[in-house]
Amino acid sequence: MRMPDAGKTMTTPSRRSVVLASLVLLLLIAALGISGCTDASRDTVYPAGAPGETPQESTAAAGTTGTAAGVPVHATTVQHTPAPDASAPYITFDPISGKNIGDLLVFSGTTNLPEKTAVYLYRTFGSTGEEKLVSNREVFAGPDGTNRWRFVSDSSGFDPGLYSVTVTTGEKDVKGSAQFTLSGTSLRPESVIYYSGTKKSSTGTPAITVNPIADHMQGDIFLITGTSGLEEGTLLLCDIHPVYFDDASKRPATVYNGPSGTAGDTIVVRGTGGLNTWSFALDTRAFEKTDYVVNITTVSEDFTIREIVGKAQFALK
């Protein structure tokens, strides 16, 4: 038996409940959708510029990094070297291209460390090699107002392969690192030899020659090179100083305030035609404008005897 009034009474509230439930469900889905979009936007970290700008490809060489606090790159963004955060101390590397054995190596970069801060260059050969301290330099002001650092090195005594280089402060609390590959054939002997004066060739004591050095501008970087009949691996000392150190009559009225000269070592490497070669990298950024003497000598194992000498001169303009 049909009951129309009862049927109307029962269906009207039920439809309202369904409509209300549907509206609540739609609002809930919309809220979850908005929440999901908000979280996703937080995951997108823009390495440079304000949020919403397109991340730019880095112009730095692959493998070049700095340890200044930078914004991490999300997996979905363009991979790059983070730009330094000027609010924290940083050291960055300029791009390093592929090098060949015998090339002059120049490692340089920027930093916000104060001028004259001492920084140290460390070098590691291979992925599991031992880290070795190479030398130290001071931070200097760059021409654009940004502080800079720079190291130079001669690669003649290196082996081919992958190298990692790190520049750091003395406390190692600020540092930057980079990698480069050195190509070519190794000229390096198995061990270093200290000339004792007892090893003579058929023509007498081997000589050290210094190839003519052209005059340079203050701040130039270049290799000083030469030849020798000494055995491969013989250790040589390189001493470069103003001529007025040896001859006081040539001392200028005004003497440069900064360091003006350097000393270091190198080794004799395999050459051709019966003559081996040697080379020494020189950075004259902190040198005064004057004439310089270059002395290249052998040295005994206790560093007390310097016997064979090669000499040359050049001027900085």
Image (cartoon, grey):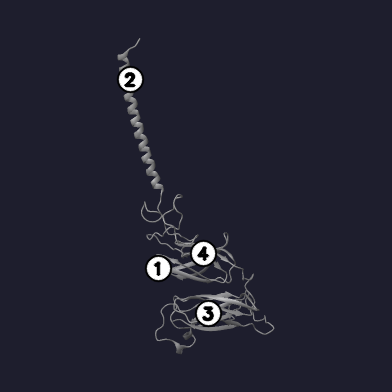
Point out the tag, 3 or 2, that comes first from the N-terminus.
Answer: 2
- What's the residue at 58%, 80% (across, down)? 297
Q: Residues within 10 Å of mark 4 (few under 14, many from 20)?
A: many
Numbered circle sitting on residue 197 = none
Q: Nearer the viewer, mark 3 or mark 1?
A: 1
| Three-letter amino acid code of the residue under disc 4 | Val
Q: Which residue does the image show at 38% across and 46% down from the upper left?
A: 41
Give the mark nearest the N terminus, 2 or 4.
Answer: 2
Residue type at mark 3: give it. Asp
Label 2–label 4 contact, CB within 8 A = no
Q: Residues within 10 Å of mark 2 (few under 14, many from 20)?
A: few
Residue 156 coordinates in the image, percent (x, y):
58, 72
Residue under pointer 3 = 239
Cα distance between the residues tagged 3 and 2: 105 Å
Marks 2/1: CA–CA distance: 81 Å
**Residue 172: percent from the left, percent from the top?**
47, 62
Question: Could you say which is closer to the camera, residue 12 or residue 304?
Answer: 12
**CB atoms of marks 3 and 2 within 8 Å:** no
* Circle 2: residue type: Thr
Q: Quadrant of residue 84?
A: bottom left
Question: Which residue is under mark 1?
Answer: 147
| In this view, 253 is above or below 70 | below
Residue 153 vs 311, above or below: the answer is above
Q: Disc 4 marks which residue?
A: 165
Q: Establish if 270 lies above or below 169.
A: below
For disc 2, the marked residue is 11
